[in-house]
């Protein structure tokens, strides 16, 4: 009997996970057909630092993030044409692998390559299994979004307008050859501190250590995927842009405290709804209420910090905070009965 391709076997497993994520979203206010599916391959389970952008792995990096851009300019890695902070961050991720953005790809094949490539480089003496992450995101943003650029500019200026748990997904980007070849995008983590992505947004598949070398061989033979060549399909780009423009799936928001609170409740409502579907009979309402109390305390603390930065009187700050607190109370009471 002819042996089945390892690569095809794993693609079958991935397909089942995509279907599972679609089904989980069915019946919610999210159309499963509008979900953005993305992938990330890691050579092993990094446990505490899994899915963590490099900037947050050292507390000192966050403090001097702006200095990184200055260095890249000094050494002519970033030229004057890269005048947007998002562009600079993408270049930083590309050249020095330090940024607040996590690489993802919208093509599963490059992510499988990254699950396995360490075996080719003889880096894995412990023979670790790789981990493939399959994401389904209900919303995403263009890398040219004014909203995202304003957000990032405020972060670099030291303002606390961004709520750390409200990560943003940045879709297809063609800023450099690497992103073109990998069909890449990013998850943008916007706070001063790292807030992990809830596992409701993804499923995982372990890539067995003994399968890694076989998968690499098959990726090269079947799809011409190897170190120096991952297919850029330039001729299809115009059609892709036109289709994306017509679909109307990109978000357009203004930067404000109110928008961050709205985004927060959209995200939390979605996460709780998906958590109920994922856990089914194992869902614990007491744990749910405990998490809501913690989320509420975190959100109120964030709102208070932002309001305290405003150039208004102490009395106006108090009135503004009380107004937002009442709105937050109402929204959390709604969450409890969903």
Image (cartoon, rainbow, N blue to C red):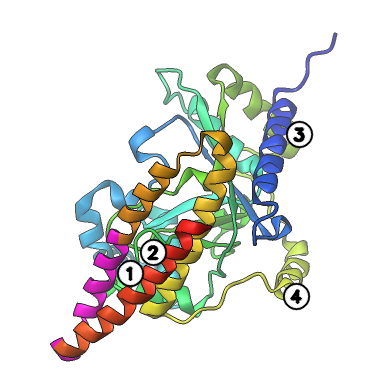
- Marked residue nearer the N-terminal end (2 or 4): 2
- Asked if marks 2 and 3 touch (Cβ < 8 Å), the reply is no
Looking at the image, residue 200 sits to the left or right of residue 216; the answer is: left
**257, above or below 333, in the image:** below
- Residue 316 in view in this figure: yes
- Marked residue nearer the N-terminal end (1 or 3): 1
* Quadrant, the N terminus: top right
Distance from disc 4 to disc 1, alpha carbons, whole Å, reads 37 Å
Residue with the mark numbered 4 = 246
- Asked if marks 1 and 2 touch (Cβ < 8 Å), the reply is yes
Residue at the limit of the structure toward the right, as seen here: 1
Distance from disc 2 to disc 4, alpha carbons, whole Å, reads 35 Å
Q: Residue at x 39, y 43 (%)?
A: 286
Q: Which residues are magenta?
A: 297-314
**327, above or below 201, in the image:** below
Q: Nearer the viewer, residue 234 or 76?
A: 234
Q: Residue at x 54, y 65 (%)?
A: 175
Residue with the mark numbered 2 = 77
How many other residues sit within 10 Å of disc 2, few (<14), some (14-19) or many (≥20)?
some
In percent of width and height, residue 173 lies at 58, 63
Secondary structure beneath dot 4 equals helix
Q: Nearer the viewer, residue 15 or 100?
A: 15
Residue with the mark numbered 3 = 222
In percent of width and height, residue 187 lies at 48, 56
Residue mark closest to the camera, 1 vs 3:
3
Residue with the mark numbered 1 = 73
Looking at the image, residue 187 sits to the left or right of residue 105; the answer is: left
């Amino acid at each position: 009997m002819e042996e089945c391709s390892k690569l095809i076997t794993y693609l079958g497993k991935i397909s089942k996970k995509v279907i599972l994520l679609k089904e989980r979203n069915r019946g919610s206010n999210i159309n499963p057909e509008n979900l953005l599916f993305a992938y990330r391959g890691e050579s092993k389970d990094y446990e505490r630092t899994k899915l963590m952008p490099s900037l947050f792995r050292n507390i000192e990096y966050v403090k001097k993030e702006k200095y990184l851009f200055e260095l890249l300019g000094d050494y002519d890695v970033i030229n004057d044409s890269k005048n947007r902070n998002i562009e600079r961050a993408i270049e930083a991720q590309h050249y020095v692998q330090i940024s607040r953005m996590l690489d993802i790809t919208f093509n599963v094949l490059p992510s499988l390559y990254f699950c396995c490539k360490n075996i080719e480089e003889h880096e894995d003496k412990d023979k670790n299994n790789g981990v493939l992450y399959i994401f389904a995101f209900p919303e995403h943003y263009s890398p040219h979004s004014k909203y995202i650029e304003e957000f990032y500019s405020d972060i670099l200026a030291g303002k606390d307008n961004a709520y750390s748990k409200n990560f943003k997904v940045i879709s297809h980007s063609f800023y450099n050859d690497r992103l073109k070849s990998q069909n890449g995008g990013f998850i943008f983590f916007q706070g001063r501190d790292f807030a992990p992505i809830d596992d409701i947004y993804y499923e995982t598949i372990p890539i067995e250590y003994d399968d890694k070398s076989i998968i690499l061989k098959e990726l090269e033979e079947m799809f011409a995927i190897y170190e120096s060549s991952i297919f850029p399909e330039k001729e299809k780009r115009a059609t892709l842009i036109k289709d994306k423009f017509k679909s109307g799936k990109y978000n357009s928001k203004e930067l404000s405290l109110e928008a961050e609170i709205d985004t927060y409740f959209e995200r939390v409502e979605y996460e709780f709804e998906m958590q109920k579907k994922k856990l089914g009979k194992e869902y614990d309402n007491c744990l749910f209420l405990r998490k809501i109390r913690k989320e509420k305390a975190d959100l109120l603390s964030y709102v208070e910090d932002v309001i305290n930065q405003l150039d208004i009187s102490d009395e106006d700050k108090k009135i503004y905070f009380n107004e937002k607190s009442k709105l937050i109370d109402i929204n959390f009471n709604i969450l409890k009965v969903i």
